[in-house]
Image (cartoon, grey):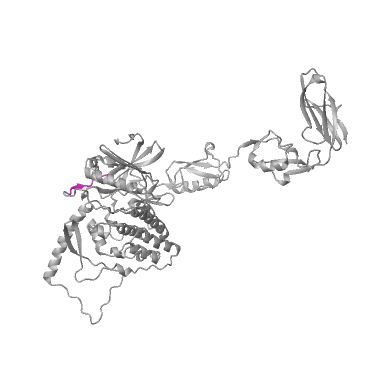
Amino acid sequence: MDQYIGKMLDNRYEILERIGTGGMAIVYKAKCHRLNRLVAIKILKSDLAQNEEFRRRFNAESQAVAQLSHPNIVSVYDVSRGGDMEYIVMELIDGITLKQYMEKRGQLNWRESLHFITQIMRGLSHAHSRGIIHRDIKPQNIMVLRDGSVKVADFGIACLADSAQTLTQEALGSVHYISPEQARGDRPDARSDIYSSGVVLYEMLTGRLPFEGESAVSVAIQHLSSIPLAPREINPDIPEQLELICMKAMAPDLEHRYQSADAMIADLEAFRKNPEVEMKFDLSDLRPEENDEPTRTIRTMPSHTVTIPVHQPERNYPRRERDEDEEPRRTGSGKRGVLVSAVTVAAVAVVIVLFKTILGSFAPAVVDQYQVPDLYNMTIEEAEDDPRIEGVFEIQKAGSEFSTDVPEGHILRQDPKKGETRKGSQLVIQVWVSAGEETGEVPDLENKSEQDARILLEKLNKEYNLELTVEAPEELKQFSEEITEGYVIKTEPAQGEILKKGDTVKLILSKGPDIKPVTVLPFVGMSIDSVLSQLESYKLTCDAADVEVVDSDKPGGTIVWQSPASGETVPEWTTIKFRVSAGLASSALPITVDIPQNGKDIVKVEIYVGDEPNPQYSETVYEADGAVSTTLYGTGRKMVKVYFDGVLDQKQSYERSFG
């Protein structure tokens, strides 16, 4: 059991699970109870926390990255230092690395590559403006989020650009992305990040690295002395101007390279707006000068240098043609050839020492040799806890593959292979994890009818023999303003999730808009204009066709009838119909009605005039009163109906003249 899982740090951060291990630190998923949010916490490894130099470096990283706040950089929320434990609280990213993304997608199209590299450069521009150099730009340190945005991560070996300290003895990241000046042991600057970003763009566009080799040293020497194959020779679909941007970023000579991230962003934006825009950059600028003695000086330590011959690569760019009267170059004597060979061997030996230093740990005086352990059928957590791994190897998940032999979540294969020997410290083992038996993926069923969704799932069922169960539980139905009733809002599992044999897919169907009931108010007697202006606030509606003008003794525009009636409960946005008085002249008719004596205490008396739906008189009176008097209004002859407790009194109900 991991010693930190379940712990509460600073009475605020609850450690939930381990999510990664790096060369210097272990990364955990945690919950911040103060702000009620999930975060990532990077804790310095306990053995390194005892080393004051490592603690200094870890703290410097924390303070440097905490200065950065940009949508394309993973945010740092908090830094803690106390006792023998140090940690950084960071933004928890819901996504995958660009490396994993490229392994899944393969060669990216140029539009997607342009989208990613522009965001990477924006993040670096912000960091460079704060004096911070990343020094380790590579796809493994770039996160791709679900919305297509990217964030530059792990400024773990970044340093302040204005710091006086040389870091030639510190880890400088993957040699495939290292800049020539870093390979020489020179002090890097912002242009070093631009070179590494150019390599990342090259890999996205072509699906391959610009330089490959059997060892880190051979790759590093190619960065120093070779020009990569032009991207368009690998993928002709790449626009010529984007190729020029990529190659300018990767110019071996610092002066020929982009001088700032902003300068590269300007060209990227100009290309995005007009792919035909002319870039003022000549690929021939990439050629090293043809000297009689092509050598390169490499600084191995602050006070030691070595000169090595530069191997002229095969080029895809034309060489300078020699004039007819120009004498050919002379070749060296046999002795000189032997001397050069001797210098070459010696130089390579020194370069090997150099790269062990650069790519190793803080104290590389003694380089240990380790045998790669067998991780087959282990989980990543089991491998990280293995004593043969801890403190020596870093486990990196390279991808997932289907397997009928290895259970899901267990390591299927590894690189380097078991039994191989590796020298150095904090070495990397890439692992591929089993995804279980080959399965299908949940298709996109959003906004499809239940019937269509079932047809698509049945097709998937037959294709992969999955024996799926498809359900549409009534209790999971949801209201939706956008999705029609009976259509799919989402699925469980979600779109893109892996389906295994015997799985159940639940269709979450729409119930349509969430319509709530409302109670109709009494509008009779009110002005129609006033009611119509407020009707929407009552979540009711009325069209002009729903208003009928009738003769009435009420003032013009007065509502004399409504449907539904007052007090009825109806769905929201029900249409209300009204009858409105035309405002004709009316006459008053005094009337007295006798109350039947039936031995009751009280009686409800209602008097209606003509076809009016509502009574002109409605009161509850004492039976002992014997009679009630009131004044009715109307025009012409109208039937006057008298009701006692809802029962029509035939004797007192008859036509009467008004006026």
Residue 379 seen in the figure: no
What quarter of the picture does the C terminus occupy? Answer: top right
Residue 141 x/y as whole percent: 33, 51
Residue 258 found in image quarter? bottom left
Above or below: residue 426 compared with residue 279: above
Quarter holding residue 28? top left
Residue found 25% across the figure and 70% down from its top: 289
Q: 356 or 419, which lies in front?
A: 356
Residue furthest left as drawn: 335
Residue 504, image x and y in percent? 46, 40
Instruction: Name the residue nearer the viewer: 128 or 138.
Output: 128
Residue closest to the eye, 6 or 187: 187
Q: From the viewer's perspective, is 512 left or right of 530?
A: left
279 and 408: which is toward the camera: 279
Which residue is farthest top? 599
Residue 428 horizontal/vertical position (percent) = 26, 49
> Total of numbered circles in the picture?
0
Say whether residue 10 is left or right of residue 559: left
**309, above or below 535, in the image:** below
Q: Is residue 604 above or below residue 330?
A: above
Residue 150 visible in the snapshot: yes
Q: Which residue is farthest bottom?
A: 325
| Residue at x 87%, y 33% (from the top left corner) | 655
User: Is residue 370 on the magenta stretch?
Assistant: yes
Picture quadrant where residue 55 is located = top left
Q: Which residue shows up at 54% across the image and 40% down it?
A: 478
Q: Let me know if residue 9 is in the magenta part.
A: no
Q: Which residues are magenta?
A: 367-375
| 643 relative to 203 in the view: left or right | right
Image quarter where the N terminus lies is top left
x and y percentages locating residue 199 in the rendered image = 32, 59
**Majority secondary structure in the magenta region:** loop
